[in-house]
């Protein structure tokens, strides 16, 4: 047997675990780690799989984290969609829809409410301060003027104003919109009250057509009819409400500069330097 | 190991009891100093514990364990600047048996003395040859598994082992 063959044979024996060299190696010693090292490693191993840590790294928790989150998000979304109020659509023709939806339309629809608020304001005011209201009424009755279109301008002027509304309705001279305006305007207390309200500009704009003077003013239907307005001024004169008559005559002339005055009002116009 | 991965701490105790002696000797033969060997040994087990959740039974646990140990020993060689641990990189000059510590105990004839001589010869071997010899002696793994642990081919592992055996036998034959 050649040395190479002998070497191969020894190597094969060694691989099979039956060699003198292996036996000698095993006789060399059976060293073991110390007991303290055993305890430390085992403790670390046990701590690593302790129940509290296993819960944190639980594969169950990992697997259910994403589905649970998705379910929560889905539930919240559905709740929001279901509970959210739907926008109310105003039924009506397509042509009117744009007009109704415009800011101007919305504003004009709100205005009567606001006007109603301003109309109620004097009543509330008088309720709060009845003494002041009574004083104001007394003063207006004394000097023949009044800042109140309903209460202060009582008597014939108020009756006339009420009567004047009827022909306007019957003749249908005033357009429908004006008829609508007429009612609140007759009831509107005064320009001063209107100025104190947040809607004063709107009231002033409508009143500026007749250059509103201080004193009782007839309804716009009356002002639109020069003869009716003149009769209203005559009634003021009859009731000795001179300042109111002057103010109305000035306003009348501002609006109808060439309209002939009746003979009963010529002296008053002359006193104002109009004729 | 699968049982331990799934939370059975007692499974680790069995695993540890089965492998601790061989692994400790593997570390001790490489590191030569007991304190360094204990440090390496503990570190290997810590890595096993830390990597338990990623463990998959694709190979024998022994192969996986000694792969970790082999890498840890290499890290120890590379980080040790004192020269107390020989490098496994393979470029170091081989230690001749004549220069080994065999000279001193050569005259002793008892088996214990021979075993001590063998350990001394083993320490004098190149690290790669020592590594394959220790892996074979301590684990009984096949050449393929040893090659896998060492990260080399089977023939390379076989060659290293043959060189180691030849040197050891030659040195022991010189024993009077």
Image: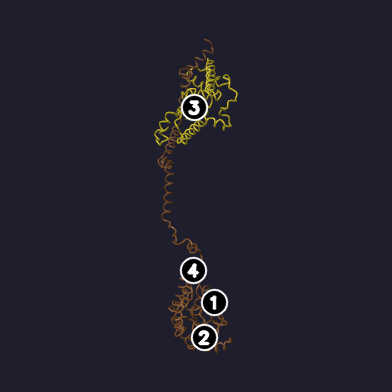
Chain colours: A brown, B yellow
Which chain letter goes with mark 2?
A: A
Q: Is disc 4 placed on a helix, strand or loop?
A: helix
Q: CA distance from mark 1 to mark 3?
A: 114 Å
Q: CA distance from mark 4 to mark 1?
A: 20 Å
Which chain letter goes with mark 3?
A: B
Percent position of residue B142, x then y: 47, 22
Q: CA distance from mark 1 to mark 2?
A: 18 Å
Whether discs 1 and 2 lie on one chain: the answer is yes
Q: Which mark is residue A245?
A: 2
Label 2 Cα crowd, 10 Å radius (few <14 / some 14-19 / many 20+): many
Question: What residue does disc 1 label?
Answer: A209
Q: Is disc 3 placed on a helix, strand or loop?
A: helix
Q: Classify A58 as above or below B163.
A: below
Q: Is disc 1 placed on a helix, strand or loop?
A: helix
- In the foreground, A162 or B108: A162
Q: Nearer the viewer, mark 3 or mark 4?
A: 4
Question: What residue does disc 4 label?
Answer: A108
Percent position of residue A169, x then y: 45, 77
């Amino acid at each position: 047997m050649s040395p190479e063959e002998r070497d191969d044979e020894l190597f094969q024996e060694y691989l099979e675990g039956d060699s003198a060299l292996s036996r000698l190696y095993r006789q060399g010693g059976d060293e073991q780690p110390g007991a303290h090292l055993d305890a430390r490693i085992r403790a670390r191993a046990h701590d690593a799989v302790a129940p509290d840590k296993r819960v944190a790294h639980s594969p169950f928790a990992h697997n259910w984290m994403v589905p649970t989150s998705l379910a929560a998000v889905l539930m919240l979304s559905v709740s929001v969609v279901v509970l959210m109020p739907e926008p109310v659509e105003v039924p009506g023709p397509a042509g009117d829809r744009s007009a109704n939806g415009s800011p101007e339309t919305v504003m004009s629809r709100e205005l009567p409410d606001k006007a109603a608020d301003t109309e109620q304001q004097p009543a509330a005011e008088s309720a709060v301060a009845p003494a002041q209201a009574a004083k104001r009424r007394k003063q207006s009755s004394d000097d023949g003027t009044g800042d109140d279109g309903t209460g202060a301008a009582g008597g014939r002027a108020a009756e006339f104003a009420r009567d004047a509304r009827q022909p306007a309705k019957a003749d249908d001279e005033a357009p429908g919109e004006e008829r609508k305006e007429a009612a609140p305007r007759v009831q509107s207390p005064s320009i001063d009250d209107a100025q104190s309200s947040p809607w004063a500009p709107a009231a002033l704009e409508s009143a500026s057509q007749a250059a509103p003077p201080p004193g009782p003013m007839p309804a716009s239907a009356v002002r639109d009819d020069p003869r009716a307005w003149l009769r209203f001024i005559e009634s003021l004169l009859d009731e000795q409400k001179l300042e109111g008559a002057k103010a109305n005559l000035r306003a009348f002339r501002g609006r109808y500069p060439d309209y002939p005055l009746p003979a009963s009002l010529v002296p008053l116009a002359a006193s104002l330097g109009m004729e | 190991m699968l049982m331990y991965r799934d939370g059975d701490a007692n499974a680790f105790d069995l695993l540890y009891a089965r492998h601790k002696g061989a692994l400790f000797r593997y570390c001790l033969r490489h590191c030569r100093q007991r304190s360094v060997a204990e440090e390496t040994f503990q570190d290997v087990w810590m890595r096993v514990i830390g990597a338990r959740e990623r463990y998959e039974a694709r190979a024998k646990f022994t192969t996986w364990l000694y792969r970790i140990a082999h890498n840890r020993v290499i890290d120890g060689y590379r980080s040790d600047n004192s020269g107390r641990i020989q490098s496994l990189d393979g470029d170091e000059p081989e230690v001749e048996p004549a220069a080994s510590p065999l000279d001193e105990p050569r005259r002793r004839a008892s088996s214990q003395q021979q075993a001590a001589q063998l350990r001394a010869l083993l320490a004098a071997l190149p690290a790669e040859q020592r590594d394959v010899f220790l892996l074979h002696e301590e684990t009984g793994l096949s050449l393929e598994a040893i090659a896998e642990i060492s990260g080399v081919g089977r023939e390379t592992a076989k060659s290293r082992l043959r060189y180691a055996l030849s040197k050891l036998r030659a040195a022991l034959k010189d024993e009077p």
